[in-house]
Image (spheres, rainbow, N blue to C red):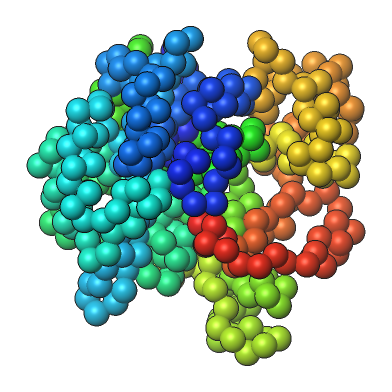
Amino acid sequence: MRVIADLHIHSRFSRATSNALTIPNLEKYAKIKGVNLIGTGDFTHPSWLGELKKELKEENGILKTKSGFNFILQAEISNIYSQDGRLRRIHNVILAKNFSIVGQINELLAKKGNLKADGRPIFGSYSCIELAEDLMKIDKDIEIIPAHCWTPWFSIFGSMSGFDSVEECFQDKAKYIHALETGMSSDPAMNWRLSKLDKFTLISNSDLHSYWPWRIGREANVFELKEVTYENVINAIRTRKNFLFTIEVDPGYGKYHFDGHRACNVCMSPAESVKNKDICPKCGRKITIGVLHRVEELADRELGFKPKGAVPFKSLIPLSEIISHLIGSPISSKKTWEEYYSLVKENRAELDILLETPAEELKKLTDEKIAEAIIKNREGKINIQPGYDGEYGYPVFGKQEIEEKIEIKHKQTGLNDFME
């Protein structure tokens, strides 16, 4: 069976998340999107874990709702520590096969920090090396995946506090790392430029903080499995067998693809940043070095190289984004939702529309311009104004839109602005 899996999300117990993140809402909107396996998010939080145990039933390492929808036990933690004379801030996704294992993980982590404070708990002076060693003592089937691995502030390769390789970060425990989450600001093609990453499976997830269809499944993994079990999912990740492709947004859509200083509305390519010595030309402060720049620093291959055995990918902009920009209405407006539901029905999910519905059928369902944009999206022909310094990128359907968007007054910076 075809399994579309979003393996990294958050609950309402994480900071900067929707209060309406509940099991029923996650199931409802995952089905609308076309995702049929989703992470639970935040199993480290006692209150959320209690809800998971109450509402979901264990079956072959997968948790199921009463209607049979699939969840997998998943959490994200923040490791902040000093190594090699530098402060490191690394986020890691953890997958586990049952509540018993999760109980042991939480018992361990409760000794390292406060699990009640945040759905994504923060651990000071607890290294990735120690984390991997401790979790493998509990169960070798636990999967540790460095999250959004290029994000400047909180990732394994981040320009602000990361490392130059998995081995530098995890040292002799790197053997327990099988996969890397590319994050929204990079795609597999960018990661293929580093030969040192060939051994790692590249996965993609939404890291959602709300359940809306422009968040849930915006990045995902597509497997072909005989049965949805924890073992089959982990084997697909570790061996790449039955791993068909990943779904990506264009990396320019991510918050940190380009370099820049958003307080001054300054967005620069890596070449422009180098020319300006990584200094904002308006205020003279140091700019935030984005993901593309960081990849350029570490790459030993030209763009276009594809390693043998690499999992393919398909780039897609969420349908709501396309509709919103073309009709000139906010993404959550009634007008956008009405157009969205003219396409998405009970038997036709958003990802069906984006990936498979023929052009002629699309033109019968919606405005011709929207139908054409969906096909261009499928073919990777929509231009993106790149994100930078915490600002999302966005699709561009005309020059005027760039000029209008760039004048939008920026909101005050918050913690969520430093995440993917």
Name the residue nearer the viewer: 224 or 380.
224
Residue in the picture at 47% in, 39% down: 11
Visible in this render: residue 202?
no
> For residue 265, which quarter of the picture?
bottom right
Residue in the picture at 44% in, 59% down: 150
Position of the N terminus by quadrant: top left
84 in relation to 120, above or below: below
284 in relation to 401, above or below: below
50 in relation to 70, above or below: below
Side (left or right) of 218 relative to 386 = left
Side (left or right) of 297 relative to 281 = left
Residue in the picture at 70% in, 65% down: 411
Q: Position of residue 410 (x, y in %)?
A: 72, 66
Residue in the picture at 75% in, 31% down: 375
Name the residue nearer the viewer: 159 or 115.
115
> For residue 155, which quarter of the picture?
bottom left
